[in-house]
Image (cartoon, rainbow, N blue to C red):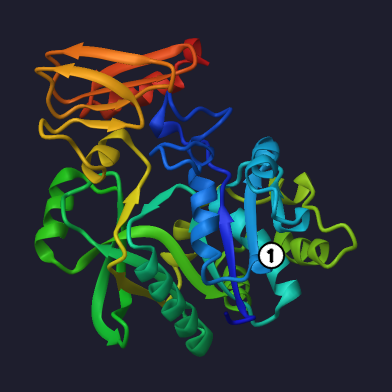
Amino acid sequence: MSNRNFCLILAGGIGKRLWPVSRSSKPKQFLDLCGTGRTLLQQTYDRVSQFVDADKIYISTNVQYLPLVYEQLPQVDDMHILEEPLRRGTLASVTWGMAMIRKIEPEARVLVTPADQLILREDVFAKDMLEGLDFVGNTGNMLVMGIKATRPETGYGYIQKSDVGHKNDIYRVKTFSEKPAPEFARMFVQDGGFLWNTGLQVFRADTFLNTVLDLQSDYQVGLPRMLAQAESDDPKLVPEVFQILPNLSLAVGVLEKANNVYVKECTFGWADMGTWASLYEDLPADESGNVVMNSKAYLYECTNNIISLPKDRIAVVKGLDDYVIAEEGEILMICPRGDAATMRRMHTDTKFK
């Protein structure tokens, strides 16, 4: 393993699109959704520790979730668990992570990964990530990981690759598109030049920090304060630094604006554990098209449903087609699988808080 390879795992999201199973008190990254015996965060840590030294793996999470991270990853040093005092999007979280990592290794090459993904071929994943780390280390460019789009998924971001290619299936990025309308998603799949954006990014820490300074005027004050705090004897980020930063994603704040961004077309098998609709498409189904997630259910004349229940619950269902049946705590949700608008209203309704 290269002593310049690092990883930052992002584990601070609230996972609201998988409500009610994923709740703000315990979002999806801290759950064992597929019955493997390991939560999504633990699986992510296990995956990256195969090719990144354990002492070079960092976790970024909201202050609310620190106890969950400590409980699920007790082997991680406290100094490697980075506290997000406020919610300011992934750009702020990653910038703080890069400030901390650069202090340790000025030429660090860093994989940034969400904590809530399903990876099917972990050996291929490791190979792709190592090739990406070498690419950014040798070129100083930034790299995002893409997967060939196989269906018109409106819940994913898309990356259009250009004709400018390098070895190892790496291309210069032409455009980014976030969660397109159905007609555009169909066009992207038919075109063949668009990849799903996995949310996996690789870059050198110094390249990233310099790019943030160049592209985001709002960081002209905040970033120097982050760097100074990282060098202090007690490198905990104070809330006042986050308060002055805009609420931006890494993609919108940096990747879509920079001119040195490339995409690697990967084949490791990937699913975003983001919505009930995407989970249904990516998880194995029975002969009637039902996806039963680590749950016990007796289904009669049921087709194309997705079901997620607590271990002590049993569902007996007859005659449903294309529904989500999900229960956690005091809430049972039964909703048409394609009705994303209603599910969004449910998880924001104050009477369900």
Q: Quadrant of residue 266?
A: bottom left
Taking the image as shown, residue 213 lies to the left or right of residue 197, namely right
- Please name the residue shown 53% across and 57% down the image: 46
Q: Check the image and report above or below for 316 versus 168.
A: above
Residue 143 visible in rendering: yes
Q: Quadrant of residue 121?
A: bottom left
Residue at which label 1 appears:
220
Q: Quadrant of the N terminus?
A: bottom right
Front residue of 72/188: it is 72
Front residue of 275/29: it is 29
Relative image position of residue 325 (x, y in whole percent): 29, 20
Inspect the image, locate mark 1, and give the three-letter code of the amino acid beneath it.
Answer: Gln
- Please name the residue shown 45% across and 47% down the image: 116
Relative image position of residue 338 (x, y in whole percent): 20, 29
Front residue of 220/36: it is 36
Taking the image as shown, residue 35 lies to the left or right of residue 93, namely left
Does dot 1 land on a helix, a strand or a loop?
Answer: helix
Relative image position of residue 30 (x, y in whole percent): 54, 39
Residue 260 visible in rendering: no
